[in-house]
Image: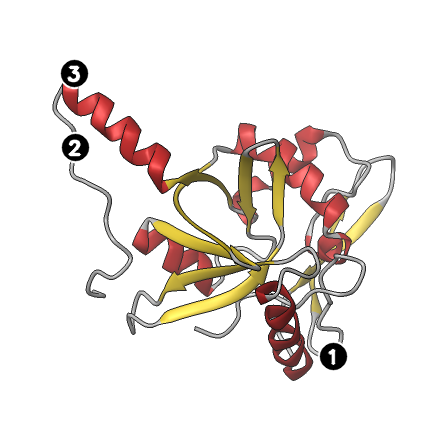
């Protein structure tokens, strides 16, 4: 899987692939009486170089990025890309600003991911948020990852309802630590039957 999104700049945003990006051909309302075209992501060679640089920085704990590792749904190989999380206290959310790119498909197929920054490594299961819950996370995300704004119909000043309206284009996942998920499963097992267990990321591709 190639890196699924652009790399990150020194301001904590994401670099836009200016040489290959193009507009989707429609102009959408962006709130406050303005209108904005929605850019479609096309990754450039520069983005691949940038991803490599910021992956190195994330490995030593420098900058805002975390390294997201998924297992390729077709190859079974581990794939890593830098991402920016939305965080509040102990809660973590993973946003896909460019839609169902390869890491999203891999994460959905596996049911879990690993995140690393510096020496910290944690495994998580995923829960995709419904649109009504994803809206507020997307609204916050474009404020901390400003270079992704051209890929949204809503602007940073738009009400949360506009983010809810386009949440299907930008999947948002709640990250649940594996230890918490296991404890929850154990508690359920004591009280009632539990459905099939978590599907490991190393399962055979179909």
Rendered location of residue 108, percent (x, y): 36, 51
Return the mark for residue 19: 1
Q: Secondary structure at mark 3?
A: helix
Image marks 3 and 1: residues in contact by CB distance under 8 Å: no
Rendered location of residue 7, percent (x, y): 66, 68
Q: Nearer the viewer, residue 205 or 168?
A: 205
Answer left or right for 12 relative to 34: left
Q: Label 3 belongs to which residue? A: 191
Residue 139 shows up from this direction: yes
Rendered location of residue 192, percent (x, y): 14, 19
Q: Is residue 176 above or below residue 169?
A: above
The number of discs equals: 3
Would you identify the image quadrant in which residue 88 lies?
Answer: top right
Closer to the chain start, of discs 2 and 1, is 1
Label 1: few (<14), some or many (≥20) within 10 Å? Answer: few
Which mark is in front, 3 or 2?
Answer: 3
Rendered location of residue 57, percent (x, y): 65, 68
Structural distance between the alpha carbons of marks 3 and 2? 13 Å
Residue 42 shows up from this direction: no
Answer left or right for 21 relative to 106: right
Q: Is residue 15 above or below residue 117?
A: below
For image coordinates 71% across by 59% down, the residue present is: 63
Label 3: few (<14), some or many (≥20) within 10 Å? Answer: few
Would you identify the image quadrant in which residue 202 lies?
Answer: bottom left
Answer left or right for 188 relative to 78: left
Q: Residue furthest left?
A: 193
Would you identify the image quadrant in which residue 24 lies?
Answer: bottom right
Q: Label 2 belongs to which residue? A: 195
Image marks 3 and 2: residues in contact by CB distance under 8 Å: no
Which mark is in front, 2 or 1?
Answer: 2
């Amino acid at each position: 899987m190639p890196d699924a999104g652009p790399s990150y700049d020194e301001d904590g945003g994401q670099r836009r692939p200016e040489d290959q990006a193009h507009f989707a051909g429609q102009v959408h309302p962006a709130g406050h009486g303005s209108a904005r075209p929605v850019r479609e992501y096309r990754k450039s060679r520069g983005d691949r170089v940038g991803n490599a640089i910021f992956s190195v920085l994330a490995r030593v704990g420098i900058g805002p990025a975390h390294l997201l590792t998924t297992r390729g749904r077709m190859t079974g190989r581990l794939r890593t890309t830098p991402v920016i999380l939305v965080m509040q206290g102990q809660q973590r959310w993973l946003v896909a600003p460019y839609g169902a790119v390869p890491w999203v498909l891999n994460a959905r197929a596996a049911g879990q991911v690993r995140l690393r920054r510096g020496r910290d490594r944690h495994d998580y299961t995923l829960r995709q948020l419904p649109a009504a819950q994803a809206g507020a996370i997307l609204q916050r995300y474009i404020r901390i990852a400003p270079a992704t704004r051209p890929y949204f119909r809503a602007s940073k000043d738009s009400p949360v309802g506009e983010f809810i309206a386009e949440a299907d284009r930008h999947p948002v996942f709640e990250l649940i630590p594996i230890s918490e998920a296991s404890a929850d499963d154990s508690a359920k097992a004591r009280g009632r039957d539990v459905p099939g267990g978590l599907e490991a990321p190393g399962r055979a591709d179909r």
